[in-house]
Amino acid sequence: MSRKTTILSILVVALFVIGASVIYSVFSKKPASQANNNQTQVTQKELSPNGCLEENEIADYDRASLFPEITQPKERSPLIFVKNRNTGVAIKSFRINNVRDSAYPMELHKCGVYFIQDFNYDNGKGLPLPNYRGELWQYGYNNEGGKLLMVLFDFGKEDNLNNNNYSPTFRVSPLEQYIALEKGYLGQDDYALIIKDLKTLKDVFVLSAKSTFDQYPNMAGSFGFDTWTDDSRYFWGDIFDGAYVNGYFRIDTQNWKAEIFEAPNGAMGGSPLNVNTGYLPIQPGQVWTGDVEFDQELKEQHKREGKKSILYLYNLFTKEKKLIETTNEPIFWFKPEWLSDTELQYELPSGEKKIYKTNEK
């Protein structure tokens, strides 16, 4: 065999070995899910490119991380979970930092997480630092997002008041078309409820407090946010003065008109309005002082006077009032709660819970 033939043979064998090695490495490689199960339980399934949940997915967050009485130290960095709707198994999770730790910290919708993010804030003292700012943010479930608009809060300093002075309260419509915000505060000339288009962030509706209270002087108070209807057509809220509600409003996004309803006697901040039916549990004569000792004194006085606690169901649309329950225990709160559009649950002084059905006579 000549030297050239020998070299050629060696080259052919070498090429064959290299090719076989490449083919083996490609076809014998384990899937990533088999290589590291602990890591890929969360990361192996990518969410849709636009950051929206799929039909078989739900989202939730770790509420404990927002409240200091539950976790120490106070992180204010909730963990967002995306789970399989049927199995409850986590598909993905990510953490959001510097979330405002209010009673209403964030909203989770199909295509985004909405929340107020604090910057330059002393968590320990609960006070803003120089150059503090609060911003309304939106995150997709692909862990991508950004600032929607700056929200500056009033801490009693003149330099914190400007045209972007919104409260930290917001409500995003279920279809994520609009967001309701409270601009300014009671006493300011431009105090108003604002509804913005979520895409353009332009105002599409303004409910001015001044013009509203000029027309309905008995309803003067602060704007309270209730909720959107499931179809995103109506936004409901109330006008309150302390614990007492003076009126309700419903904004129609089809014609951008606001309906104003005068609150009946006994409408309180804890009275849950059924926004689909207009039904509202009320307790005429109910008193709330915010002082436990004073409440007890009033309770004893009302007992001597033979006063009772009475629960009614009132309809804002028809002004119909139905008697639901009576107890000899004065200044008692029945703790009403809607289980559905037709079922109102309430509690008796004994602790017994009862259900009133609006569709039964």
Image (cartoon, helix red, strand yellow):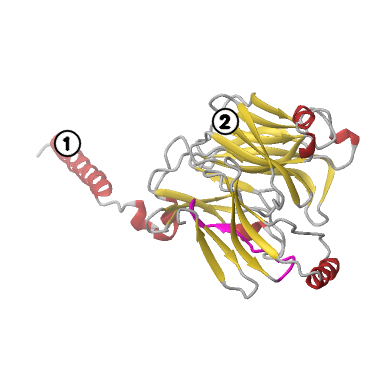
Residue 348 place in picture, x, y as percent: 62, 70
| Amino acid type indicated by mark 2 | Asp
Q: In which quarter of the image is residue 209?
A: top right
Residue position marked by numbered label 1 in the rendering: 8
Classify 128 as above or below 66: above
- Of residues 305 and 277, the one nearer the viewer is 305
Q: Are marks 1 and 2 in contact (CB under 8 Å)?
A: no
Disc 1 residue crowd, few under 14, some 14–19, many 20+, Cα 10 Å: few
Hey, which residue is sitting farthest bottom in the picture? 350
Which range of residues does the magenta coloring cover?
Answer: 329-343
Q: Quadrant of residue 76?
A: bottom right
Hey, which residue is sitting farthest left in the picture? 1
| Amino acid type indicated by mark 1 | Leu
- Of residues 258 and 309, the one nearer the viewer is 309
Q: Element type at marker 2?
A: strand
Q: Which mark is residue 278?
A: none
Residue 269 place in picture, x, y as percent: 70, 52
- The residue positioned 66% from the left and 50% from the top of the image is 104
Residue 3 place in picture, x, y as percent: 16, 37
Classify 157 as above or below 24: above
Q: Reply yes or no: does residue 65 show up in magenta.
A: no
Task: Pick whichever of labels 1 and 2 is earlier in the sequence.
Answer: 1
Q: Quadrant of the N terminus?
A: top left
Q: In which quarter of the image is residue 292?
A: bottom right
Cα–Cα gap, marks 1 and 2: 84 Å
The chief SS type of the magenta part is loop
**Left or right, residue 154 beside residue 321:** right
Residue position marked by numbered label 2 in the rendering: 252
Q: Element type at marker 1?
A: helix
Residue 197 place in picture, x, y as percent: 59, 27
The mark closer to the camera, 1 or 2, is 2
Disc 2 residue crowd, few under 14, some 14–19, many 20+, Cα 10 Å: some
